[in-house]
Amino acid sequence: MTVLIMAVMAALCLIAAPRTAHAAGDLATYLSKLTPGEFFPDADRFGAPQGDPPIAAVYRRDQLKGYVYLNSDFANAVGYSGKPIHILVGIDQKGVISGLKLVDHKEPIVLIGIPEPRILAALNGLLGKDMTPIAHGAEHPPQADIVSGATVTVLVMHDSIVRAAIRLIRSGRIGAGIATAAATQPSVIKTIDPGQSEIRDWTNLLGDGSVRRLHLSIGDVNEAFARSGNAAAAQNPEPGNSDDTFIDLYAALASVPTIGRSLLGDDGYQRLKARLQPGQQAIIVAGDGAYSFKGSAYVRGGIFDRIEVLQEGASTRFRDKNHTRLGALEAAGAPALRDIGLFVTPPEFTLDPTEPWQLQLLVQRATGSHDKAFLTFDLNYTLPDIYLKRETRAAAKAPAAAPAPAETTPASTDETEEPLWMRIWRTQTINIGVTALALAVLTGIFFFQNVLVRRPQLYTWVRRAYLLFVLVWLGWYANAQLSVVNVVTFTNALLSGFHWEFFLAAPLIFILWAATAAGLLFWGRGPFCGWLCPFGALQELTNTLAKWLKVPQITVPWGLHERLWPIKYIIFLGLFGLSLYSVALAEQVAEIEPFKTAIILKFARSWPFVLYAIALLGIGLFIERFFCRYLCPLGAALAIPGRVRTFEWLRRWKECGSPCQRCAKECPVQSIHPEGHINVNECIYCMHCQELYYDDQRCPHMIQVRLKREKFEAMSSPTMRAAKAGPKTLITHAGQRLNVTASSTDLTRPS
């Protein structure tokens, strides 16, 4: 585990390291476990993987039958889990897909939930599909057969297979490729005219096609499903009058100056320009009516599954990181629309704004308790000529035809392509900035803890606000929940061939692990377990609510409590040992962590997992942070190296533990021994004991200090000094009584 800390810290120095070429080894590893006949019926051997990205020829004796490639080598295949989905794809020399094999994934909805064969059946529509016309732009990409409950997973798998095939064909390494020979006639180059930047009203924008519209009534949709041949869908029509609006959909290319300034306003357009990278485009999509183009998958999985952008055979769907919600359109006369979103094209998809493209709307209809039917409708978009300028260039000499691919290494078409993890980091700039700011705030809280805990009310609200941020934004929105799976995966990678790219592909997870590793050196496991764990925050906030509602709290007897501590260490060691045998099996057993259910999937899962997570939260209403105390394997994994922490900033009085037990009784996780010392393995650094340390109304030591101070102040007050200096009686040798005052040197007789 010490190796884990040092390696994560060293990663910060290796971010700029060049990408290592390891894909060929992965392809070869997967092929060694399969037979050629699974991709081509009469094939009998694989050739060696060649090129970058690698492809492997498939032969029947000496006859070339086609090729096999790994989808994730050619296209982004990051799924619901945030990890790549690896699929081997067989494709013949003409560009026809001949076989598919799912070889590795971490999708929770498939690992435990929807059967894998059902997911694969949704991809079978690609078998026998000729991808060459799609790569040429002559046809639209085929649509995925959506599986209800696994929409995101199926879309990612389907899209990555199609995009990978298109990229492979266009590279010229198989089939005829894309003809790149220029015509002998001069070519006309179209570009956006930057001089066109006036502000126009809604009517003009809609009138000349700057804003395109797709209006569907309920009758239009019912009729389309009736024509589809799906009897179950036709028998379940949309409710309402046939003339009522089903969806009123608008699209516009906001990266064009006139359109962007008109719809976003000057300030909004300037912010958009600053955000766009070279080659990126921005699209405004707005809609109203009974059907929302956003759907709900973007809330659960971060992907907008109901809209897709297509151009010349390539396509993309947007994720939440590409999306900015807009409240209204700035153009004069623009209607009030329910859903308005500004979408930036992802780096892996190039949209040519001068050429036609389509926004495809996916309409779904329930046909049963778990089944749905799907139809698509196209909104075609062509940028008006007024925004374009044309330049005539002489034609270049046509290049010689590329030699037919053989079992030799073809030239890579992407030698200078930026690594995927760099593109991911650049597209998540805002999320990374927010996370860095949150970590900076937490660092300030820790470094200035003595100032904060002296103000108990302020400290309480600061902590609750921070935990709420961690739960809602870091957990439910950004899905940045660390897991013991990260630990076993990292350790396995160190043993079996380590590659930083895999871990750098998830920026927020990487940053949190780096911060957690640094925190271990200063404060042990406390910064993560007590402040940065979304599920821990959920437990504490729900327990706080329970206390407010007067739910009785259970104090576990100390003897039983210290015997329950080891359970989480046993669980961690069991998972760690199991991971040495099978990482995949260890990841399934790691479901003892309810993080995936409660945070990543937001309880949108099969009932046994939801029941388990709710049960743990329910127990936590009576025993604060029950899961953290006794069951969390990640807490155990962090506690082991946390023993090496350099500083001890938690202060104690000599009376702590003997005789005073106040901190021990009020510690929310009972990490303070009856003898008074704090068990750093169990401490979550909530600072409650430090709040008591300075409290002169609750801490017995501080109460004594306060009483002494008050007595001293009372004795030193002007009234007390005057009393001490008041008239005194003096008896003379003659027995006479005289009054003596401090302000008089005379002796006066008593009256």
Image (cartoon, rainbow, N blue to C red):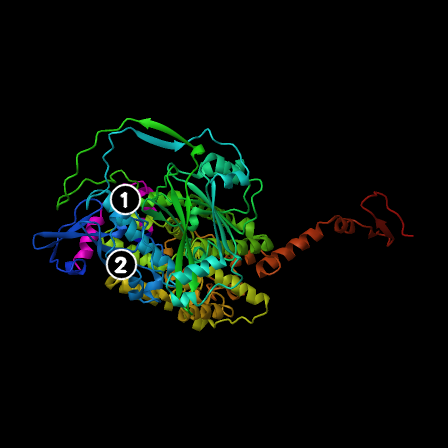
| Residue 8 included in the magenta stretch of the image | yes
Q: Position of residue 734 (x, y in %)?
A: 86, 52
Q: Between 127 and 224, which is closer to the camera in this rendering?
A: 224
Q: Residue at x 57, y 48 (%)?
A: 336
Please report whichever mark, 1 or 2, sits nearer to the chain's N-terminal start.
2
Q: For residue 136, which numbered disc appears in the image?
A: 1
Q: For residue 104, which numbered disc appears in the image?
A: 2
In the rendered image, the residue lying farthest to the right is 751
Q: Position of residue 526 (x, y in %)?
A: 44, 56
Q: Between 227 and 621, which is closer to the camera in this rendering?
A: 227
In the image, the segment drawn in magenta is 5-33
Q: Residue at x 21, y 32 (%)?
A: 398
Which of discs 1 and 2 lies nearer the camera? The answer is 1
Pointer 1 local density, CA inside 10 Å: few below 14, some 14–19, many at least 20: some
Q: Amino acid at mark 2?
A: Asp
Rendering quarter of residue 13: top left
Q: Amino acid at mark 1?
A: His
Main SS, magenta region, reads helix
Q: Position of residue 407 (x, y in %)?
A: 12, 46
